[in-house]
Amino acid sequence: MGLTGVLGYHITMHRKGDAMNLLTIFSRFPDQEACIEYLEKVRWGHNPYCPLCGATTVARKIDSGRIGRWNCHACTSSFNVLSNTIFEKTRIPLQKWFLAIGIVVNAKKSVSSHQLARDLDMNQKSAWFMQQRIRAAMLTDEGELLQGIVEADETYVGGKPRKGNRR
């Protein structure tokens, strides 16, 4: 499962498997720094690495105004936790991304980009862009297939059609 799939699960689940609502997401991730700290923990744990060359000889860049930047000593590149993810090269705050993931994952049916734009106070094109990236990340085939007994609610699989009114 890609970072977004894992992230979608972690963002929308609270203690002991309880679904997390938008207020909880908003309070858990109050600013950009909290979001970056969380992404670093989920993606790297305690061992950050360069997404370009894979080297672990990296150091946090001490620079004013740029939160979460890292320098790689092997390939001399500068990167952050957003590199090679759906959040790369976006100007939309991470808090809005996390809320959008929560809305998309918790929706019973699909959410329109117009509704997402209204919910997040942004324009429709940006909301559509976010939805496309979230959906593409959820389509990755990196996850394991379900095994054993699987229960699903509100599912219709096979069977004969019901008799309708014959008049």
Image (tube, rainbow, N blue to C red):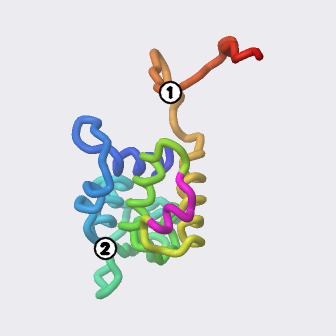
- Dominant secondary structure (helix, strand or loop) of the stretch shown in magenta: helix
Say whether marks 2 and 1 touch (CB < 8 Å). Answer: no
Q: Residues within 10 Å of mark 1 (few under 14, many from 20)?
A: few
Instruction: Report x, y in % for residue 125.
Output: 59, 72
Instruction: Report x, y in % for residue 122.
Output: 48, 74
**Badge 2 amino acid:** Arg
Residue furthest bottom as drawn: 64
Task: Please state the extent of the stretch shown in magenta in the rendering.
Answer: 111-118
Question: Please, is residue 134 above or below residue 6 in the view?
Answer: below
The residue positioned 24% from the left and 59% from the top of the image is 28
Indicate the secondary structure of the residue bearing disc 1. Answer: loop
Total labels drawn: 2
Residue furthest right as drawn: 167
Instruction: Report x, y in % for residue 106.
Output: 42, 46
- Residue 144 falls inside the magenta stretch: no
Q: Do we see residue 73 in this rendering? A: no
Look at mark 2 in the image and give the residue it sits on.
60
The residue positioned 41% from the left and 70% from the top of the image is 80
Indicate the secondary structure of the residue bearing disc 2. Answer: strand
Q: Which mark is residue 154?
A: 1
**Badge 1 amino acid:** Glu
Instruction: Report x, y in % for residue 52.
Output: 52, 65
Q: Quadrant of the C terminus?
A: top right
- Which mark sits nearer the N-terminus, 2 or 1? 2
